[in-house]
Image: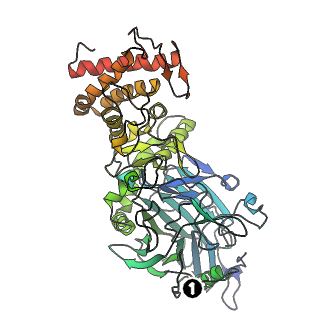
């Protein structure tokens, strides 16, 4: 279905030739100039997905053309998932009205990649029928993403600045379930322009992309049931609150969402769209919004996935820029263990949901703090980007911090931090904060030392038995921590070295003193009869399970390096705690 039939209209008796439009390329105008580490032109946008979300909260990704994709906020991965209400998915749109009456409306997105038009039924891209900007670029310095949109037929340029707060050494500030979306609207003309920015999000609570229903054009994602939207006004924010009457309250997909704005300006909304087929639903919305930039309410009916719409109207002076901010927040408390059997004993919860009552509470607390949270994020990103490291190293290091905010990692209700080895499209891959895999990463320790220390506490105090064998995968809840019952030579030795590293970085003598008896046993486990180094000659000869998912027998440099490193680290720790005989 295509509904892009111009949507830029001159006032009666006028022509568009009278509009003065600046020809220079779009520039970034915002309350704070953002650093850029990597920029992509219009021919290289299709595969971009910048995750927006906190540590342990899940994320929604900002696509290269300005779309929102990969909605992974319901306690599991959901690669490629874009929730829809009928054929309409999440999108933002802009309406403009110039002083002489000319109006225009566009989706705030760039062109769709040509490859997405190659399906038997036409385009596979959600919202492909909407008119959109003709020119688009993307700039990034994680977690800051900028989409720069322009069009010669539109009197404004729009730059979307999207981020989630990232502040090293502060995992709570870096663990907020929010995507902050700032639409900076720059007037290219010599007269004021009336502008409205409208966000549209289907209330898809209950649908995490794991369930499907049959459709004549293919399987569709399903799961929402008796969901509802409500307009609210709170402390410094206004917007739409989304919850559900029909989704089971103990389900991992149960929770709340909100689309709000802290921006001062006229606000209109819809709690639902009309019902219908053959494009009438989208046309009803577009006819309403493109008429004057305001939204008229529609009669609420009985539907499982109602659309929530929120529009903010402002005036943009000639040749100036005005920001309009939206907050997308969420709250899904029912995280289950690694491989759940869907009973109450498998529920481990989410730390972030203990910090907020619901998604509206998140918005009320974040709204007044957007500037402060942005400043904290900018201090870190600017300092990193201004370093003298090679550009390729900076890109690799900074962009991969995003893994900490993906569904690879999570925090249970008690605040402890865990991680899979990685993610598949619909589930985490290889459970248990696998010791030998997590040996390879250092971002946690160097950016969020308190989280790294939590991992050491779990490994030594929870997952190590009285003999000193550390289960290299931690089962959850924690009372199951030792159930896996297998040790990995490189994983266990690496944890000893990481214990030394984290003690050195933090200076936390109390942690070292508390965990030292467990660390000591983990070293002594190497020397048990028939063990890795039963003759205590400093060379591993026994059966050594390792990160290659095989067993090594006899001396080898790969395990030998980990072992020697662990022995040296243990020596230093033993000296510090006064265990001279062991040292």
Counting from the top left corner in percent of width and height, residue 114 is at: 75, 60
- x%, y% of residue 20? 64, 75
Quarter of the rendering occupied by the C terminus: top left
Front residue of 385/489: it is 489
Quick one: which residue is furthest to the left in this view?
578
Residue 279, percent across and down?
68, 79
Q: Say which residue appears at 51% left-offset and 73% top-offset.
A: 225
Is residue 365 visible in the rendered image? The answer is: yes
Q: How is the model colour-coded?
A: rainbow
**In the picture, residue 524 is in which quadrant?**
top left
Camera-side residue: 460 or 503?
A: 460
Q: List x then y, in percent, for residue 35.
A: 50, 50
Vertical order, 500 against 329 (above or below): above
Q: Quadrant of the N terminus?
A: bottom right
354 sits to left or right of 435? left
Please tell me which residue is depicted at 71% across the width and 76% down the height of the picture: 4
Horizontally, is 335 left or right of 47 in the view? left
Q: Secondary structure at mark 1?
A: helix
What residue do we see at 68% from left, 52% from top? Answer: 44
Q: Is residue 348 visible?
A: no
Q: Is residue 105 above or below residue 144?
A: below
**Residue sitting at x 68%, y 73%:** 153
Quarter of the rendering containing residue 160? bottom right
Taking the view exactly as shown, the residue that stands out farthest to the bottom is 13
Residue under label 1: 292
């Amino acid at each position: 279905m295509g509904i892009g039939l111009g949507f830029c209209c001159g006032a009666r008796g006028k022509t568009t030739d009278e509009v003065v439009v600046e020809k220079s390329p779009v520039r970034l105008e915002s309350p704070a100039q953002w650093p850029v580490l990597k920029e992509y032109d219009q021919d290289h946008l299709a595969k971009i997905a910048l995750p927006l979300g906190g540590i342990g909260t899940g994320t929604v990704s900002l696509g290269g053309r300005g779309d929102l994709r990969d909605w992974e906020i319901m306690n599991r991965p959901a690669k490629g998932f874009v929730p829809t209400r009928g054929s309409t998915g999440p999108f933002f749109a802009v309406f403009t009205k110039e002083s002489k009456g000319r109006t225009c409306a566009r989706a705030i997105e760039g062109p769709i990649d040509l490859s997405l038009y190659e399906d038997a039924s036409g385009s596979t891209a959600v919202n492909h029928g909407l008119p959109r900007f003709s020119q688009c670029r993307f700039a990034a310095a994680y977690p800051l993403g900028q989409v720069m949109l322009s069009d010669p037929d539109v009197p404004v340029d729009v730059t979307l600045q999207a981020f989630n707060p990232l502040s090293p050494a502060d995992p709570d500030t870096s663990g907020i379930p929010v995507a902050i979306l700032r639409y900076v609207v720059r007037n290219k003309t010599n007269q004021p322009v009336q502008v409205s920015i409208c966000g549209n999000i289907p209330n898809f609570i209950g649908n995490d992309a794991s369930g499907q229903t049959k459709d004549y054009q293919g399987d569709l994602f399903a799961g929402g049931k008796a969901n509802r939207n409500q307009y609210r006004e709170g402390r410094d924010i206004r917007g739409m609150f989304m919850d559900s009457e029909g989704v089971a309250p103990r389900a991992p997909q149960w929770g709340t969402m909100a689309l709000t704005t802290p921006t001062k300006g006229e606000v209109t909304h819809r709690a639902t769209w009309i019902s219908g087929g053959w494009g009438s639903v989208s046309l009803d919305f577009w006819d309403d919004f493109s008429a004057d930039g305001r939204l008229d309410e529609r009669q609420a009916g009985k539907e499982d996935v109602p659309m929530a719409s929120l529009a903010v109207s402002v005036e943009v002076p000639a040749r100036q820029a005005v920001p309009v901010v939206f907050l997308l927040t969420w709250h899904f408390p029912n995280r289950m263990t690694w491989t759940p059997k869907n009973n109450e004993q498998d529920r481990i919860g989410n730390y972030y949901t203990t910090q907020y009552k619901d998604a509206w509470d998140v918005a009320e607390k974040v709204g007044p703090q957007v500037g402060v949270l942005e400043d904290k994020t900018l201090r870190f990103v600017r300092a990193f980007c201004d370093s003298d490291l090679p550009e390729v190293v900076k890109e690799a290091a900074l962009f991969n911090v995003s893994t900490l905010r993906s569904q690879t990692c999570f925090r249970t209700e008690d605040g402890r931090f865990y991680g899979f080895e990685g993610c598949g499209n619909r589930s985490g891959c290889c459970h248990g904060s696998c010791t030998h895999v997590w040996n390879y990463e250092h971002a946690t320790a160097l950016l969020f030392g308190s989280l790294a220390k939590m991992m050491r506490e779990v490994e030594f105090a929870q997952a190590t038995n009285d003999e000193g064998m550390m289960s290299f995968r931690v089962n959850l809840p924690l009372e199951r921590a030792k159930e896996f019952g297998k040790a990995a030579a490189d994983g266990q030795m690496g944890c000893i070295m990481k214990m030394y590293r984290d003690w050195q970085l933090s200076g936390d003598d109390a942690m070292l003193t508390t965990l030292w008896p467990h660390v000591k046993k983990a070293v002594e486990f190497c020397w048990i009869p028939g063990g890795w180094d039963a003759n205590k000659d400093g060379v591993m000869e026994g059966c050594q399970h390792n990160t290659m998912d095989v067993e090594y027998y006899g001396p080898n440099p790969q395990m030998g390096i980990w072992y020697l490193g662990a022995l040296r680290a243990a020596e230093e720790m033993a000296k510090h705690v006064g265990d001279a005989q062991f040292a």
